[in-house]
Amino acid sequence: MMSPMKKVWQRALGVLVLLALGVAGGVAWLQARDQARSYASESDKASALPALALPERVARGAYLARVGNCASCHTARGGMAYAGGRAIGTPFGTVYAGNLTPDPETGLGRWSADDFWRAMHHGRSRDGHLLNPAFPYSSFTRVLRSDSDALFAYLQQLPAVAQANRAHALRFPFNTQLALTVWRALYFKPAVFEPEPAQSDAWNRGAYWVTGLGHCAACHAPRNGLGASVRADELGGGMIATQGWYAPSLSDAHEAGVLRGKPQAMVDLLKTGRSGNASVVGPMAEVVFRSTQYMAIEDLNDMVLYLQSLSKPALIQAASSAFRQAPGKPDLRFTQGEKIYSTHCAQCHGEQGQGVSAIYAALAGNRAVTMANPANLVRVVVQGGFAPATTGNPRPFGMPPFRQTLDDAQIAAVLSYIRQAWGNEASAVSPLEVLQNLQANEAH
Ligand code: HEC
Ligand code: HEC
Ligand code: HEC
C-alpha cells in the first residue's frame, strides 16, 4: 500500500541517499571494503564433501532450481525457460531478471563456477558490478558452495537461448552502482550457513532451506523504505511492494493460522496448495505451483519443523476488538454486507461461512479473513483466483473476480461482514482502504 506518508518518506530517503552519494571519499572506502569482502577467502570454503559426479550434480541442481524458484523470475511470460526478461516491480522502478542459459553472448556461457558463486554469495556479476537485491542474494548468500556448483552445472546443460538482457528501468539515484554500494554497506553482508549445534539435524536442514534457497523472507520479511529487511524477525510479515499483497508473519501464530495446527497441515499446504478447507492464493499460490510442490516430503517436514519453532505466542490485537459488533446492534455496513454476501458469496462459502470441505474455503474462523491487514481480502475479491494446480489438488476450484460487479463501498461492506459475522472478530474495512489497496497496484 503506497500511502502519501510513505511517498514522503521515500522521497526523504532518496535525498538521504543522494547526500550519502555526495560523500565521495566515504563511498570509495565502502566500495573498497565491499570489494575486499567479495574476494575474501570464503569463496574457497568449498564444502568438505567429495564433489558429486556430473549427472548427480545436474540432478541435484535441477531440484535446487525448483527450491530457489529460479525459473519464475528468469522466464518472461510466454518466453523460453531461463532466458530472462521478466519484469520485477520494485518501489524504485522495474528490474529485469537476466538470461541464465549457457548462451556465450547473452547468457552464462562464458561464466565459471566461481563467477556463479560470486553472484549467488556476494551479489556481484561476472564483470564485478553489483547486482540489484531484487535478485534475492540476501538469502542465496547462505547457499553452500557445493549447492551453488550443482545449480551451475544444471543451468549450463540447458539449451542455450540467445536473448539479450533488458536494461533495468530504475529511478535515479537507485539506478547507480553507488546507491547499491551504500545499500550494501547498510544492509548486506555475505553470510555462510552456520548450523545451530543445539538444534537437531532436521531443524538445521529446515533452516537452510527457509533462510537460504527458499528465500521465504523475500516476501515474508518486514521492509523499510529502502526495501531492506532490518528486523531480527526475518519472517515477521510484510507487504509485497507494488503488488498490494500481504505475506503474513510466519512467526506469529495469530497471522499464520497453520502454525497453530499440526505440522502435517502446513506440509500439505506447501505440497498441494490446500489443507482442509484452507488454500493459498495470489503470490503464494505461485510459490507452491512453481516451487514447493516439487520439494520432497522430508525436506518440507524439515522446513515446517523449523518454522513452527519460530512461533511466538499469539499477540492480542487490540485493533481487532475495537470495531467489534455489539450483538444485536448491527450497523448499516454490516447489514448491507450481509445482503451482498447472501447474493454473491453464500452459494459457495455457505450461509454460515462454513465453506464446503476440500472445495470452497470456510470463511468463519479463517485466519486469512480475520488477519489485521485486509490487503489480501481486497485482492481476492477484486481479482478472484485459483489455488495452484498440484498433483495433490489437480483441479482446484476458482473464485470469480468481482471487479465488475461490486464497487469499493460494496466490497468494503461485504469484507466488513465476513470479518465480523459467525464469531469472527476483526476490524471493519472502509471504502477508503479498498481504494488505497487497489491504487497500490496501479501506482507503478
Ligand atoms: C525474485 C526474483 C528472482 C529469483 C527467485 C531469482 N532471481 Fe536471479 N536475478 C533476479 C534479478 C532481478 C536479477 C538481475 C539483478 C541485476 O541485474 O542487478 C538476477 C540476476 C541473477 C544472476 C546474475 C546474472 C548476471 O548476468 O549478472 C544470476 C547468476 C542469477 N540471478 C541466478 C539465479 C538463480 C540460480 C536463482 C535460483 C536459485 C535465481 N537467480 C532466482 C531475480 C531473481
Ligand atoms: C513471492 C512472495 C512469497 C514468497 C517467496 C513466499 N511466500 Fe508465503 N505467502 C505469500 C503471500 C502473499 C501469502 C498470503 C496469501 C495466502 O495466504 O495464501 C503467503 C502465505 C503463506 C503461508 C500461509 C500462512 C497461513 O497460515 O495460512 C505459508 C505457510 C507460507 N506463505 C509459507 C511460505 C514459505 C515456507 C516460503 C518459503 C519457501 C514462502 N511462503 C515464500 C507470499 C510469498
Ligand atoms: C463460485 C464459487 C465462489 C463464489 C461465488 C465466491 N467464492 Fe470466494 N472462493 C472460492 C474459492 C474456490 C476460493 C479458493 C480460491 C483460492 O484458493 O485461490 C475462494 C477464496 C476466497 C477467499 C480467500 C480464503 C483464503 O483462505 O485465503 C475469500 C476471503 C473469499 N473467497 C471471499 C469471497 C467473497 C467475499 C465472495 C462474495 C463477494 C466470494 N468469495 C464468492 C469460491 C467462491
Image: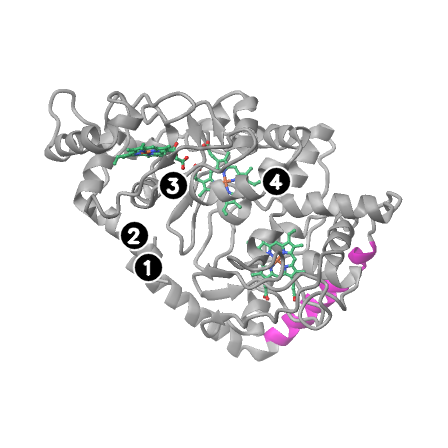
Q: Amino acid at mark 3?
A: Gly
Q: Which mark is residue 442?
A: 1
What secondary structure is found at the residue carrying circle 4?
helix
Q: In this rendering, which labeled residue sits more in front, label 1 or label 4? A: 1
Q: Mark 4 — residue?
A: 210
According to the picture, the residue beneath numbered tag 2 turns out to be 438
Task: Tell me the quadrant of ligand 3.
Answer: top left
- Report how far apart the C-alphas of labels 2 and 1 lie in the structure: 7 Å
The amino acid on which the numbered mark 2 sits, given as a three-letter code, is Leu
Residues at badges 2 and 1 in contact (C-beta under 8 Å)? yes
189 left or right of 183?
Answer: right
> Measuring 61% from the left and 78% from the top, which residue is drawn there?
25
Q: Name the residue carrying label 3.
A: 385
As measured in the structure, the alpha-carbon distance from the residue carrying label 2 to the one carrying label 4 is 30 Å
Label 3 environment density (alpha carbons within 10 Å; few <14, some 14–19, many ≥20):
some
Q: Main secondary structure of the magenta part?
A: helix
Residue type for callout 1: Glu
The magenta-colored residue range is: 26-44
**Mark earlier in primary sequence (3, 2):** 3
Give the secondary structure at mark 3.
strand
The numbered mark, 3 or 1, whose residue comes first in the sequence reads 3
Would residue 414 be visible to someone looking at this image? yes
